[in-house]
Each structure stands twice: as structure tokens, then as C-alpha cells.
Amino acid sequence: MTDLRAWLPRSVDAVDAWMARFGAYSAHPSVEVDDARLEEAFTLLADRLRDNYPFGHPRYVGQMLKPPHPAAVLGYVTAMLINPNNHALDGGPATAAMEKEVVAGLAGMFGMPQHLGHLTSSGTIANLEALWVARESHPGKAIAYSADAHYTHARMCAVLGVEGVAIPADAAGRMEVDALVDVLDSGRVGTVVATLGTTGLGALDPLPQVLEVARAHGARVHVDAAYGGFFALIADGSADGVDRGPFAATGGADSIVVDPHKHGLQPYGCGAVLFADPSVGRFYVHDSPYTYFSSDELHLGEISLECSRAGAAAAGLWLTLEVLPLTDAGLGQVLRANRRGALAWHALLEGSDVLAPYQQSELDIVTYFPRRQSMADIDASSHALFTAAASLPEEERIDLATYVVSADAMRRRGHEVVEDAERARILRSTVMKPESAEIVGGIHATLETLAS
Ligand SMILES: Cc1ncc(COP(=O)(O)O)c(C=O)c1O
């Protein structure tokens, strides 16, 4: 186990040793604060931070949340002590170079023959940039996305003043290609967004077919793989891998978004956007009288809508990928373990008299609900289970998340329900930590007991 108590002083040593070359140094020597006051405030901070969910604990199986890997913390903190800004090379040459390296690694993971890309502060901003480039490339045209796509696409279309078109999702939560073709036939769509790993269900839109029909209609394809992108490392169709097809096609997309702050083990503030055609850099061209003076090399701010960005985010990802590379045996082992956990849980749900799986899990999200007859009853009992699990004594407590489904979506998945309410909450768990994957049997057994 990597012990940060041993490693973090090395961050301070490394930066101090380098700064000492410029003469005597300590950070902010003229803004001295009283140690006693700092102690008091720090104690308060530590106390206030207890008002949190235990994201790092194996029994936290709710949202896509977990602490960063120690390597990410070490890389981030060490660089943060210098605080480079990856906007321009004059803001952080070392971390800008690291950013270009990790971005090239991500493009390689998706099989992009060439690329232009950068890190962003989030998947939201990365998608905004991709949709903005979509608008600039196909002015006046609409952007189509699945009804199950992340809500950010509809919102960002509104921000960009572009028409957004929601395409129905099928009974597996994947974009319906026939419905997409109908909309493409109208000629009004310039870009199609395919989601590889929907946020709610982890469903994979059929990218090969989406690419085919979009190309036939002269439309671009953007892939939102903010959540599911790193599953490309284990997309081999094996027992603990994921479906090969959608990931094998990513190299043919026009742009891809992936969030290292999800499965890339990074702290928040680390998304990424990649474009297949480097010439889209033309849309970013702007004049800046105060930056880009240190070199003729590409400054990342020249191809980014965000200005200041933490160089530390690039350093965290760079160090992580040095020790857990973008390979099946590297970071892939984490995703395989998660996938095994999701599959094992799904199998338990299928055999349960108390809980039912909502649909097959494609990545590491598992969705399920107490076996009840009516929508209102499913909603109430799901919420009761969510609350009861979180209310167990701290050393047994289980944290889940919920997901809202319609009666129609239930029926399409073969769950016959009395429609006394239009929608119901069901339960949703992301098995995002190998340690959680190892205990899904125990988690499931406790939830069964609580639900019955
Ligand atoms: C598919 C998808 N797209 C976009 C986002 C938004 O990313 P972020 O939360 O990093 O802004 C998410 C977040 O869960 C996501 O799952």
C-alpha cells in the first residue's frame, strides 16, 4: 500500500530543493500566520470535513466518487506547491509538456490516428468545447444525442444557441439507430453525440452504427466517454472485460471526451477533450497581448476555451500513468476488478426473490429495485432501502444512489408494473473500487435483509 504519510514530505523536499537554487526560500514569508490560530482553524476544518459520505470506503457504492490514487495525490501536491498554470508555456512549461504527453496517451487509448486535445477542469467543460467546435464546423445545424445522454448536452446546446435533438433510447438504454436515421434524414443535424457509458445506466450507444449513419448523412460524431472511456482498456469481450464493438470504433470519431477524474483515479479538476482533426485549432485562434511570449511552440491556452488551468492536474495524471499505464495490465486491472464486481452483483440480483436487476450492466453500474408490484411501491421501497442502508451503524453503513425511471422504461425491460405513478426511483450503484467489488456479496445480502 502506498503510504502518503511517507511520500508527502518528499513533495515539500523536492520543491524546496529546487527553489533553494534561486536563493533562500519559503512560501509567503511575509504573510506569516499564527500557528495556534492555524491549529485551531485546521481542527475545525478536519471536523467540518466529517460532514461527508465515506467515498473511499468499499461500502460506498453510490455515485461515481472515490478519492484519488496516492500517486495522483503525490503528483498533484508536488506540482501544486509550485502552482503552474497550464494556460501558457510561460505559466508552466514542465506540466504543459506532461499534459501533452498524457493527452497523447489518451488519444492512443482511443485509437485516434492523430489528435489535438487538452485537459479541462471537467467533463462538462470538455463536452462544451466539443459541442462548440461542432457548432463552428456545421453552423446552423442541430446536435443530436440520446434521451439518456448526460443532461449537459441539452444545457450546452442552449448555451451555444444550437438546436438539441433527443433521440429515444432502446430497452437497453442505448440510442435507437432507426430513430436517429429518421432525424438525420431531415437534414437538420450536423453532429451526433454517442455516449460510451451513460451516466445513469452505463449503457453503450452503438458507436459503429452511429458512425455509419452519421457519415452517410454528412454529420460529425462526438463521443461522450466522460464516464466510460477508460473501459477501452478492457474492451476485449472477455468474461471480465466489456463489449469490444463500441470502443473499437472510437478511432473513427471526430471528438472524444473522457474524465480522468472518474476512472483515471484523479482528483476533481481533470477532464479531457480530444479532436481527430488538428485543424479545428483554427476555431480557437485568438490574440493575447500578455501570454504566449516564451516560445513558438503550441501553448495549451491557444487551443482551450478555459484560461487558467491547474498544471498540478496534469502532473497528477502524468505520475499516475507512469505507475499505472494505459494498458490492460496497468489501469485496466482496476476496471476489470470493478467489472467483475458489477457482474457478480448482477448475478446475485437475478437470483434474488427480494431485489430485481433493472437491466444488464454493461460497465460497472448496477441498477436494481425491491420486487414490488406498483411504481409507487417501488419508489417508496427503493427510497426506504437507500435510507435504511445509509442509517446502519457507521461500521456497517452502505451508501447507494438512486435513479429515476418511467413505467414505460420498466415495461420495456420486462418488468410488469402497476402504473399508479408515472415515475419511480430505483437504486443505482457504481462499483468503482476493486475493494467494493470484493464485497458485493456481503453488500447484496445486507440489502436483501433490509428490503425484506
Ligand atoms: C457521460 C457523462 N458526460 C458528462 C459528465 C459531466 O462530467 P463532469 O461531472 O466531470 O462535469 C458526466 C458526469 O458524470 C458523465 O457521466
Image (tube, helix red, strand yellow):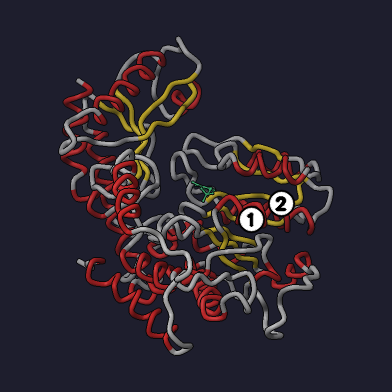
Tag 1 and tag 2, C-beta contact below 8 Å: yes
> At which x and y percent is residue 111?
53, 70
Q: Is residue 116 above or below residue 194?
A: below
Q: Residue at position x 50%, y 60% from top?
A: 270
Quadrant that contains the N terminus: bottom left
Rendering quarter of residue 429: top left
Give the amino acid at mark 2: Thr
In the displayed structure image, the side of residue 19 where residue 1 appears, left or right: left
Q: CA distance from mark 1 to mark 2?
A: 7 Å
Is residue 274 shown to the viewer in this render? yes
Is residue 176 shown to the viewer in this render? no
Q: Residue at position x 29%, y 25% from top?
A: 387
Q: Residue at position x 59%, y 55% from top?
A: 223
Give the amino acid at mark 1: His
Rendering quarter of residue 451: top left
> At which x and y percent is residue 196?
51, 52
Q: Residue at position x 44%, y 25% from top?
A: 410
- Taking depth in this image into account, of 288 and 270 the one nearest to the observer is 288
In the displayed structure image, the side of residue 319 where residue 195 appears, left or right: right
Q: Which mark is residue 290?
A: none
> At which x and y percent is residue 27?
44, 72
> At which x and y percent is residue 168?
60, 35
Label 1 sits on residue: 222
Q: Which mark is residue 191?
A: 2
Say how many tags the image has.
2
Residue at the top extreme of this rendering = 420
Quadrant that contains the C terminus: top left
Q: Is mark 1 within 8 Å of ligand 1?
A: no
Give the secondary structure at mark 2: strand
Q: Is residue 294 above or below residue 286?
A: below
Query: Mark 1 Cα within 10 Å, few/some/many (few <14, many 20+)?
Result: many
Give the secondary structure at mark 1: strand
